[in-house]
Image (tube, rainbow, N blue to C red):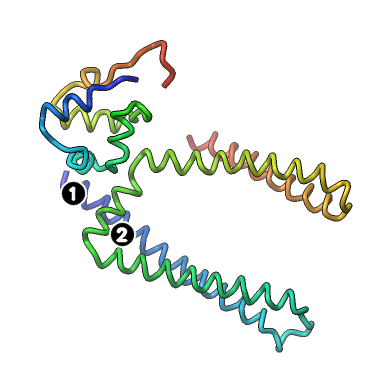
């Protein structure tokens, strides 16, 4: 699953730390999400999308060929 | 939202308080082991090895419990540490890491026990039977854990 967290974060000029605090996760989780090493749960995806004021599908791109 | 946050904060606080209670129980267990190790009042005489073993295990438990109690009390008294702990413990990636760690350890343990079982046959029948019982109990735990998860999830 791809995501645009890094792009949206840079657009909003906030640090990984700030985003992590806003969605109540550790900074390491944001790093892993941005690097594509970890896929967010539906709940976290919803929180992140809500934070950026976007729909989940605008932040997270689900690829049918890719394993979750 | 504020109310939700307050609720989560309370949950972590409660969890930490419970951890302190469990640690006190562990410390009591440690004291019991250490006292058994020192012996004297027991009807049977313990060998030097067993005496050292029980004293060591007991002391280890007491030290671990005291460290845990101090750390948790410090966290409870510090708002910033409490918030950090709350985030760390509720972080879904950390939870996933915890689950996977247990899972991999479980697989490794099963393989180690099986290899140990095969090797034990050449060493001693008693060791073989002991490992067999451990493997049996392990398999039963696995079965019931799966049954429980299937019912609750």
Cβ atoms under marks 2 and 1 closer than 8 Å: no
Q: Which disc, if any, is residue B113?
A: none
Which quarter of the figure has residue B103?
top right
The residue beneath circle 1 is: B3
Q: Are marks 2 and 1 on the same chain?
A: yes
> What residue is shown at x 73% (from left), y 84% (from top)?
B42
Count neighbours of disc 2 (C-alpha within 10 A) and say few if under 14, some if 14 to 19, many if 20 or more: some
Quadrant location, the N terminus of chain A: top left
Mark 2 vs mark 1: which is more N-terminal? 1
Vertical side of B12 occupied by A32: above or below = above
The residue beneath circle 2 is: B13
Q: What is the CA distance from the residue labelled 2 to the residue labelled 1?
A: 15 Å
Could you say where residue A52 lies in the image, as x and y percent from the top left? 15, 28
Asked whether B143 or B40 is in front, the reply is: B40
Q: How many marks?
A: 2
Vertical side of A15 occupied by B42: above or below = below
> What residue is shown at x 33% (from left), y 45% (from top)?
B90
Task: Residue lying at the far bottom in this picture: please name it.
Answer: B40
Count neighbours of disc 1 (C-alpha within 10 A) and say few if under 14, some if 14 to 19, many if 20 or more: few
Q: In what element is the residue under mark 1? A: helix
Which quarter of the figure has residue B56?
bottom right
């Amino acid at each position: 699953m791809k995501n645009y967290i890094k792009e949206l974060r840079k657009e909003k000029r906030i640090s990984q730390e700030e985003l992590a605090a806003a969605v109540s996760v550790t900074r390491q989780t944001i790093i892993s999400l941005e690097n594509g090493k970890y896929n967010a749960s539906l709940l976290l995806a919803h929180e992140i999308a809500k934070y950026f004021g976007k729909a989940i599908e605008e932040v997270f791109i689900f690829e049918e060929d890719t394993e979750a | 939202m504020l109310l939700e946050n307050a609720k989560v904060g309370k949950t972590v606080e409660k969890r930490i308080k419970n951890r302190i209670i469990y640690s006190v129980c562990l410390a009591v267990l440690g004291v019991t082991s250490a006292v058994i190790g020192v012996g004297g009042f027991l009807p049977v005489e313990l060998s030097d090895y067993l005496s050292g073993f029980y004293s060591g295990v007991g002391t280890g438990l007491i030290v671990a419990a005291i460290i845990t109690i101090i750390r948790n009390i410090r966290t409870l008294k510090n708002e910033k540490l409490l918030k950090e702990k709350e985030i760390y413990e509720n972080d879904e990636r950390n939870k996933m890491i915890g689950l996977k760690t247990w899972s991999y350890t479980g697989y490794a343990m099963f393989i180690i026990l099986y290899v140990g079982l095969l090797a034990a046959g050449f060493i001693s029948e008693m060791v073989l039977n002991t490992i067999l019982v451990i493997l049996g109990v392990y398999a039963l735990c696995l079965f019931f854990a799966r049954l429980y998860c299937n019912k609750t999830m």
